[in-house]
Amino acid sequence: MNNTLLVGLMALALTGCAGKSPERPFTLTLAHINDTHSHFDPTDARLKLGNQAVYTRLGGYPRLLSQAKALRQQAELNDQPLLFVHGGDAWQGTGYFKLNRGAMNADVLSQMQLDAMALGEHEFDLDNGRLSAFVQGVNFPVLAANLDASRDPDLQGLDNLKPYVLYAFDGNEKERVETVDDAGKRPVVAVMGLVLEDMANQSPHVGKLSFEREVDSAQNTVRALREQGVKHIVAVTHLGLERDRRLAQKVNGIDLIVGGHSHSLLGDFGNLGWESGEPYARRFNNPDGIGTTCVVQAGRFAQAMGQVSVTFTPDGRVSRCEGGNTLLSDNVFYRDIRRGDKYRLSEAQQQRLAAAIEAEPNIKMVAEDSALRAHIDKQYRPALVKAYGDEVGHVPLALTHVELPVEGRGSQIAPLVAASQLYWVNSPQVQAVTGRRADFALVAAGAVRNSLEPGVLKEGNVGLELLPFGNPISLVSLTGRQVAGLLLETINAALSSDAHTGRFPYGAGLRYSFNETSRGRGYLNRIEYLDNGQWQRIEPDARYQLALDGYHASGNEGWNTLFDSQQVFTDRLDLAFVNGKPAVFPVARLSKNGRGAIEVHYFNRPLDCKKAGVACNTDARALIDYVRARRPVLTALPESGVALNRL
């Protein structure tokens, strides 16, 4: 048996009757997932077991469901309390979302028997009408204590959108209750949700919602729950690990934070050839010096499930918090990522690997739930296969995407995306409408959503998976001083402890070297751009034409220099297709509305991506055109342009 699971089940067994007497220690176990991003199918993965590199597939929703059922069955057998929660960002990520616009997420998530879900920033990627349909379409509560929807016509008054819910336990039996009084003598657990307080800066589609301060709202909610007599409080958040820890150290009374957003796979996975994450289930002292809060998170892309067991003293304090993340693996292994029959390991080798996995504490072979697998394959997969469209090129070797360079190895894909944007904006047909030539391009790591596996590359692999947001490419001029400031703010923000690393900048036609001097802080000791085949120093007062996607060109996600430089006037051009041809939409200036969301003001005609004949996804089209014209056999560029020297 998986050791992490065994630890949790032993903890459950030792507290077998806790739910039946509130005067005795009470132990609650939570299974948790986050940032699943529509990865309904499993993802390819490389593992290292012993000295052998092997390839298999991890996760996917049918495998998550099998694991959840196993945990429920064991908890029922031992008559123990169990909750299953999602830390947000179920949306985006794959072609399934592009095609189904949240409806498939509601369908499949409802089959997972979740007890609660937090809202992530990507749940706001469409509009509040579609988000409302999702919230009303799922059979579990969606939580956000610091969200005020009272003025939004789509989300106001939804019964299923709540600040928190209460669960009363009698052993394994669980009941949603409205008040503590309704629970009688049964222990009550409150599950509250928290969303990003700066959501309006993270997502352009927040309607008339307002977002309250995370710490203040959390403390007010805890206070209200304590006044009702609730002793046990769990926060399901989508804030990122750094903010979760801040929350634990700034708020009194939260017992457990189950998080998302930073994609943090907590625990040491060096035994599998993966990086070691921060420790799982760390406890932090509350500001009152009395209470402690335990913090957990479970990675990304439906590859793993976390399991944490929390034991409380009779007066409601946390006396123990422990558990771990478990990668959920297929039972078929290959010696090459291409996975053909000729690469499949022999039966004897497969058996040895199975035994090796059985001995590891953080990975488990789990069969997919057959009913959910069949439902996805019948209802959704045929349209996905059809939508992938024409062949673009071939990927001979796996191209990996990591948001933050580690030990000198950064993303192999983000520099290609930047190169494609520089190529596209400087192509004759685009220059004919812009009258400009870009000097270099920048791409935020978070704009790239996945790695590329060997094989045929189709249009859908690019537009539905790799670059799914449908962003226009923008051309904007910055001084060399502003370019340096932009690089510094985004690098520092991405390097800070457990930050959202999607802010990290990659480039094309630009290279830089950054030296970290203290944790999450440093300086640039070189910034150069490629001018007629020669690398030249960026001059502070010279102006340069920068190509990047329109979302970050507006200063979203912490690219603040770009917003600051365009508040009064800008020469920025946004590029989209109108009736199949490149067209220019000049931007006049940027502003922020009362909710903090960035707004783009255009000269003459606004860019309306929903208008008939208008296609805004020039970011994806640029990469498709670049691969076809320049790199039909797609391999990594010789250099990433990034030299990151960390402490």
Image (cartoon, grey):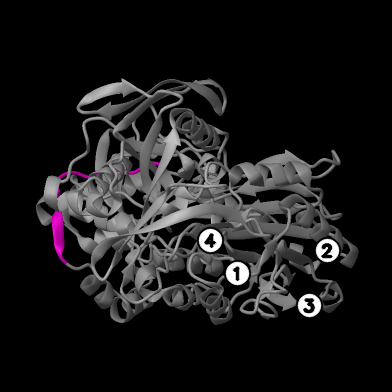
Tell me the distance, in whole angstroms, between the alpha carbons under discs 1 and 4: 9 Å
Q: Residues within 10 Å of mark 1 (few under 14, many from 20)?
A: some
Q: Which mark is residue 207?
A: 1
Is residue 36 among the parts visible in the rendering? yes
Q: Which mark is residue 178?
A: 3
Query: Dot 3: what SS?
Result: loop
Give whichever of 284, 53 is nearer the camera: 284
For the record, the magenta segment spans 390-403
Pair 1/2: label in front: 1
Magenta stretch contains residue 394: yes
Lower sequence index among marks 2 and 3: 3
Lower sequence index among marks 1 and 2: 1
Give whichever of 469, 15 is nearer the camera: 469
Relative to residue 515, is residue 58 depicted above or below? below
469 left or right, relative to 500: left
Q: Residues within 10 Å of mark 3 (few under 14, many from 20)?
A: few
Q: Residues within 10 Å of mark 4 (few under 14, many from 20)?
A: some
Residue drawn at (50%, 61%), measured in percent from left and top?
Answer: 122
Q: Position of residue 522 (x, y in %)?
A: 53, 23
Is residue 273 among the parts visible in the rendering? no
Pair 2/4: label in front: 4
Q: Which residue has dot 4 on it?
A: 204
Three-letter residue code for mark 2: Leu
Tell me the distance, in whole angstroms, between the alpha carbons under discs 1 and 2: 29 Å
53 left or right, relative to 441: left
The dominant secondary structure in magenta is loop
Lower sequence index among marks 3 and 1: 3
Pair 3/4: label in front: 4
